[in-house]
Amino acid sequence: MALKRYVVGCFDDEEVLFPAVKKVRNAGYKIQDVYTPFPVHGLDHALGMRETSLHTAGFIYGILGTTTALAGMGWVFTKDWPMNIGGKPNFPLPALIPITFELTVLFSAVGMVMTFCYLCQLAPFVRKHHFHPRATDDLFVMAIECTDRTNVDDLKGFLQSAGAVEVNYQVAESGWWFGRYDVEPKLYREENPVIG
C-alpha cells in the first residue's frame, strides 16, 4: 500500500478547531480527516463533506426485506404447501403483515450496519493508522495530506498560528491493512514534534 505524507495538528478546544478548519480549507490544503473525542455538531459541513447515503441504503435493504418476506410466504402458502383453512384465501395479506414488518426492519438494520462497517473499514483484524493516541481522549486531531508542492515547514507554522497546541509530520499508509494494534508498524514519525 502506498505511503502518504501528513502534517498533523492537534487542538485542545473545539472553538479553536472550527476557525482553524476554515482557515486551512481557504488556504487550499487538503484535510484528510479530523478526529475528535466526541461528535462535533457541524464539523462535517465545515469540512465540506457531503451528506451520507446510508439512509438510502437502509431504504433499499428494507424493500429487499419486504420483497423477501412477501415472496417467501406467498410461495409457501400458494405453491409449496397450500392449505384451505375454513375457506380463507391461500395468500391472506393482512395475516402476513407482522412477519413482513419484522423482516423489513431486520434486513434494513443488518444491511445498514454491514454497509457502515464496510464504508468505515471496520472489521476484526483490520488496522488503520492512528495519528495521535489522545485523539479519542481529549484532543482534536487534524490530518492534512501533503502533496509534492506542500512546504511542510510553512504548513506547520500555519497550523501553529491557527491555534494548534502540537504539530508534527508523519508518513503512514493511507488505507487499512490486516494487523494487530499490539505490534507497532514500521512507519516514519517525527521524533520531536513542534509544540506551541
Image (spheres, rainbow, N blue to C red):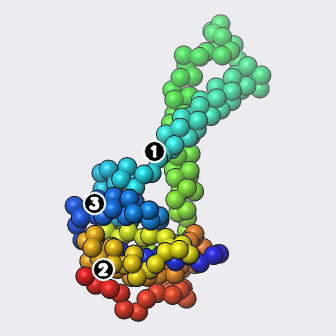
Answer left or right for 155 relative to 55: left
Q: Position of residue 63 (x, y in %)?
A: 59, 31
Residue that carries the numbered disc 2 in the rendered image: 166
Quarter of the image for residue 130 reads: bottom left
- For label 3, the crowd category at 10 Å Cα-Cα, with few meaning under 14, some 14 to 19 and many 20 or more, is some
Would you place residue 39 above or below residue 90 in this image? Answer: below
Q: Nearer the viewer, mark 2 or mark 1?
A: 2
Residue that carries the numbered disc 3 in the rendered image: 19
Would you place residue 157 above or below residue 65 in this image? Answer: below
**Residue type at numbered disc 1:** Glu
Answer left or right for 126 relative to 75: left
Would you place residue 69 above or below residue 40 in this image? Answer: above
Residue that carries the numbered disc 1 in the rendered image: 51
SS class of the residue under badge 2? strand
- For label 1, the crowd category at 10 Å Cα-Cα, with few meaning under 14, some 14 to 19 and many 20 or more, is few
Q: CA distance from mark 2 to mark 3?
A: 16 Å
Q: Mark 3 vs mark 1: which is more N-terminal?
A: 3
SS class of the residue under badge 3? helix
